[in-house]
Image: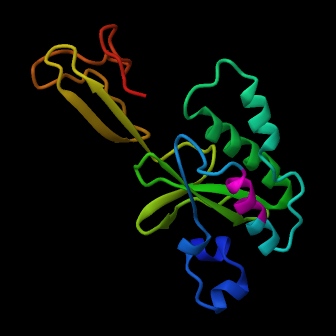
Amino acid sequence: MTELAELVLTPDERARGTGVDSVLFEMDWTGEEEPGTLAAFVAERVRAFGAQPAGVDTGVVQRAAGADPTLGRGDLPIRQLDHLSEVLAPLGCTLAVRDDGTDRYAVLVMLTGGQPPTGLTHRGLPVRAWGSPPDETLVSLDCPGCGEMLVWQLPATRSLADEHCDCGAALFDAAGRPLPDVTLHD
C-alpha cells in the first residue's frame, strides 16, 4: 500500500521530517480568502516535484465565472479545482482532497505519474483524487412530517430506500429517491 507522504512530499522533504500538513492547502467551500492563492499553492507543489507548472493558473476560470450569471455561491471553487485537476494530469500529478466532513476543501498535490492510488488516508480520514466519488455520502433533510432535521452519513454503496422518520413520515421510495414532499439540503 502506498503511503500518502510518498506521494505528496519530495524525498528531501521526507528526509527533513516535513509533515503532510505542511503541504496541505485548506479553502472554505465559498472560495479562497485571496484570489490566486490556490493556483500559487498548486504551482509551488508542482515545482517542488521538479515539473514546470505551465497552465497552473485559475485566472481563466475566475474570468469565465465572472461572466456567468448562473454561478452560485460555492461554484467557483469547484470550477477551479476541476480546472487544476485537468492541468495537473499531463504533468504526472493528481489533485487530491481529504474528506474531513467539514465545509472546507483540504487540497493536496500528489506526484502519481499515472493512475492515482486508492485507499489513502491522512489523520484517519480518506484522501481521494479530486473528481472521484467519495467513499461516503452525507444526506440531510428536514422531515416534512415533524420538521426534525435528519442526517445520514452513508457508505457510497448504500441508499435510503424506504427510510422513514421516527415520527412515521415516509422519506424515500423503494429505489432510494426522495419522495415529492422531501427536499434534501445542499
Residue 26 on the magenta span? no
Part of the protein shown in magenta: 36-43
Seen from this angle, which residue lies furthest left?
Answer: 167
Q: Residue at x 68, y 54 (%)?
A: 38
Q: Quick check: 25 above or below 84? A: below
- Asked whether the viewer can see residue 31, the reply is yes
From the image, give the main secondary structure of the stretch colored magenta. Answer: helix
Foreground pick, 32 / 184: 32
Q: Nearer the viewer, residue 1 or 104?
A: 104
Horizontal and vertical percent for residue 15?
Answer: 65, 92
Residue placed at 67% from the left, 76% from the top?
9
Q: In the visual, does 123 lie left or right of 166?
A: right
Left-right relation of 186 to 63: left
Q: Where is residue 171 in the image (x, y as percent from the top left)?
A: 26, 18
92 displayed left or right of 156: right
> Is 41 colored magenta in this rendering?
yes
Looking at the rendered image, the quarter that the C terminus falls into is top left
Quarter placement of the N terminus: bottom right
Image quarter of residue 138: top left
Residue at image x 63%, y 48%?
130
80 relative to 37, above or below: above
Question: Which residue lies at the image location 85% right of the left edge and 59% below the top edge?
Answer: 91
